[in-house]
Image (spheres, grey):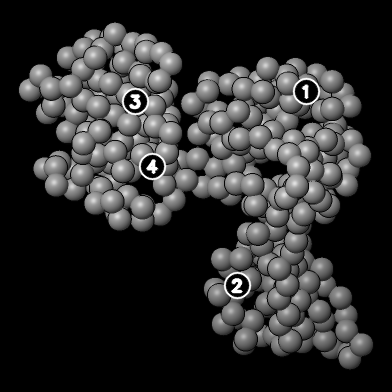
Amino acid sequence: MEKATFELFQKAYYRISGQDRTYHPYISDPDIELRILRPQEIPVYVADGVQDVGITGIDWIRETGANVEKVIDLEYGKVKIVTAFPKSAPYEKAAELLEDFWKKGKDVRVSAEYLNITSEYLKSIPAYKKIFGKKEPMIITPWWRKGDNSKARIYLSFGATEAKPPEIADVIVDVTETGTTLEQNNLRQAETIMTSTAHLVTNKAVLKEPWKREKIHDLKIMLRGVTEAQKKLHIFVNVKEENLQKLLSELVALKRPTISPLSEKGWYAVNTVISRNDLTKMLPTLRRLAQGLVVHEPQQILSLEEYAGAKDTDE
């Protein structure tokens, strides 16, 4: 997520430099200090108060169980955590494979980077509850083992998880964006355990400090402005006075547009922000009733009214 994160900040008018030379890049806001860490670490450091805020995937918040406050979904870095197994296996879902193995008395080997999420998934399968009750799957790393159910073994994967079946693992739990890598390794993508995106998170105690809370509000406004702008378009269009009200009534997406008279009498300019998805729907009406359509992609849209006079108890 590193490149996308820097691009997000730059679109929010924060200037960042030195990220290619140091783990402590410079940011133009003197009240903020940056540190580059792995997304796996960030939820824990934020929860423990080592860092005030951080950007990490919701997957690692769930995996670590970190008690952090989710400030905003930044809507990038979208991935799925899925189960997968060899296409040659006669099953549609990983749960079917697991149940069949267990009923036959076979041990199941699962390779995963997400140990806790995988353990939760296994325990959620009805067949697991029926056969093993409250036993915990055995989690195995190079340093320790925990759990009392050797019939459901979860091995920590340090990468190339998709290369583990069938010799090393019967099933994998892996992260994917498109599923291409799984397909190339002749694996069937089965259940989606969860979907994850990047989130801005904060330490809960930090929100009780007025100065830091206000700073987090500002950061949230600036970053959300970028995510909202990516869904919108800024349009300018000229329309004759006789068509103005008809245009406004037919284009229901036009909320509180700015309407200004042009230098030529009988003409008006309509200026508004619309959903990016609505432009193609609007074109037939615009083509029929207006002229001179200009479309811009906004860099930020800031909803300042949401935080006007924010009280100390806010978020």
For the residues labelled 1 and 3, the Cα–Cα distance comes to: 38 Å
Disc 2 secondary structure class: helix
**Residues marked 4 and 1 touching at CB (< 8 Å):** no
Disc 3 secondary structure class: strand
Residue for badge 3: 155
Q: For the residue marked with disc 1, what is the amino acid?
A: Leu
* Sequence order check, earlier mark of 1 and 2: 1
* Sequence order check, earlier mark of 2 and 4: 4
Seen in the image, is 158 located left or right of residue 216? left
In this orientation, which residue lies closer to the viewer: 144 or 250? 144
Image quadrant where residue 218 sits: top right
Q: Residues within 10 Å of mark 4 (few under 14, many from 20)?
A: few
**Above or below, 290 relative to 9:** below
Check the picture and name the quadrant holding the C terminus.
top right
For the residues labelled 2 and 4, the Cα–Cα distance comes to: 43 Å
Which residue is outermost to the left?
104
For the residues labelled 2 and 3, the Cα–Cα distance comes to: 50 Å
Q: Which mark identifies residue 279?
A: 2
Q: Residues within 10 Å of mark 2 (few under 14, many from 20)?
A: some
* Sequence order check, earlier mark of 1 and 3: 3
- In front: label 4 or label 1: 4
For the residues labelled 3 and 4, the Cα–Cα distance comes to: 13 Å
Residue for badge 4: 160
In this view of the protein, can residue 5 be seen by the observer?
yes
Disc 4 secondary structure class: loop
Image quadrant where residue 168 sits: top left
**Above or below, 116 relative to 307:** above
